[in-house]
Image (cartoon, grey):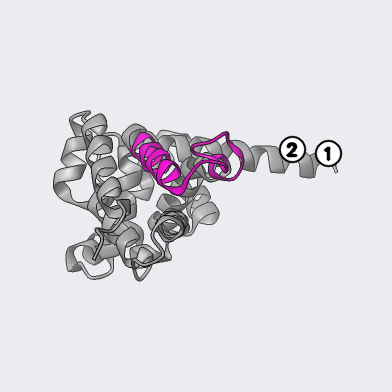
């Protein structure tokens, strides 16, 4: 029993070290530039430990995204308004977009990894790099929609749009709004430390979407 508890503690410690090392590497490199060997060396664990825990490089990126975005999901469910329940949908949407920008501004690699997964499976150079570095074990999700983090961001954004403007296509508008986060110009903006500029622009876009329709 004591040995089992020690093994669980070691596994949890290794997981934290691996995720921390991955985040540090993502602060300096794009996801496709990071190998499992680099992560293992930075975390002070064996490469096999990284593969055993996360399966593939993309599995590691997904785990990091889930870890860093979990606090935001909890805040949406239970924090005081306007981020949490109790505020009008337009105020909640603005607060939610601000919170997303805060998350990705502090974890720029997280946003890059999320956007990267949407295109990785269609890029021959990524497949070649994966096979060369990791023995072909990487498998990217079929689309960004497959990511639990993006699904949560999209579903919550869509629900808030629908609550304020049920006459609009909230599902599509949420994709358009969040999709703007994954462009190269926005990534460069974040790399320059201009997250407040991004947040302000998203607020303008959201306000325009949710404005009351003009009388016919």
Residue 6: assigned label: 2
Give whichever of 49, 183 is nearer the camera.
183
Would you identify the image quadrant in which residue 2 lies? Answer: top right
> Mark 1 sits on what residue?
2
Residue in the image at 47% along x and 41% along y? 68
* Residue 53 rendering spot, x and y as whole percentages: 54, 52
Cα–Cα span, label 2 and label 1? 6 Å
Residue 161 lies in the magenta stretch: no
Callout 2 secondary element: helix
Q: Residue furthest right?
A: 1
- Res. 138 in view: no
* Residue 168 rendering spot, x and y as whole percentages: 34, 66
Give whichever of 172, 121 is nearer the camera.
172
Residue in the image at 46% along x and 58% along y? 163
Vertical side of 57 occupied by 7: above or below: above
Residue in the image at 23% along x and 52% along y? 180
Residue 82: assigned label: none
* Residue 79 rendering spot, x and y as whole percentages: 58, 36
Callout 1 secondary element: helix
Vertical side of 177 occupied by 185: above or below: above
Q: Which residues are magenta?
A: 75-104
Question: Are circles 2 and 1 on residues that touch, CB within 8 Å?
Answer: yes
């Amino acid at each position: 029993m004591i040995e089992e508890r020690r093994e669980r503690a070691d596994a949890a410690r290794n997981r934290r070290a691996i995720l921390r090392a991955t985040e540090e590497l993502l602060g300096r490199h794009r996801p496709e530039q990071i190998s499992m060997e680099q992560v293992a060396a930075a975390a002070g664990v064996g490469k096999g430990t990284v593969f055993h825990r996360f399966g593939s490089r993309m599995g590691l990126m997904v785990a990091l995204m889930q870890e860093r975005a979990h606090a935001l999901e909890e805040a949406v469910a239970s924090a005081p308004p306007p981020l949490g329940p109790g505020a009008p949908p337009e105020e909640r949407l603005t607060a939610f977009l601000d919170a997303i920008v805060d998350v990705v501004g502090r974890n720029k690699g997280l946003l890059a990894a999320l956007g990267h997964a949407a295109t990785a499976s269609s890029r021959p150079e990524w497949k070649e790099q994966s096979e060369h570095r990791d023995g072909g074990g990487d498998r990217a999700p079929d689309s960004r929609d497959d990511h639990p983090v993006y699904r949560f961001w999209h579903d919550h954004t869509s629900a808030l749009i629908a609550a304020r403007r049920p006459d609009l296509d909230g599902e599509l508008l949420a994709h358009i709004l969040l999709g703007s986060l994954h462009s190269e110009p926005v990534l460069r903006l974040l790399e320059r430390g201009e997250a407040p500029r991004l947040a302000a622009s998203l607020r303008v876009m959201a306000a325009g979407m949710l404005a009351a329709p003009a009388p016919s």
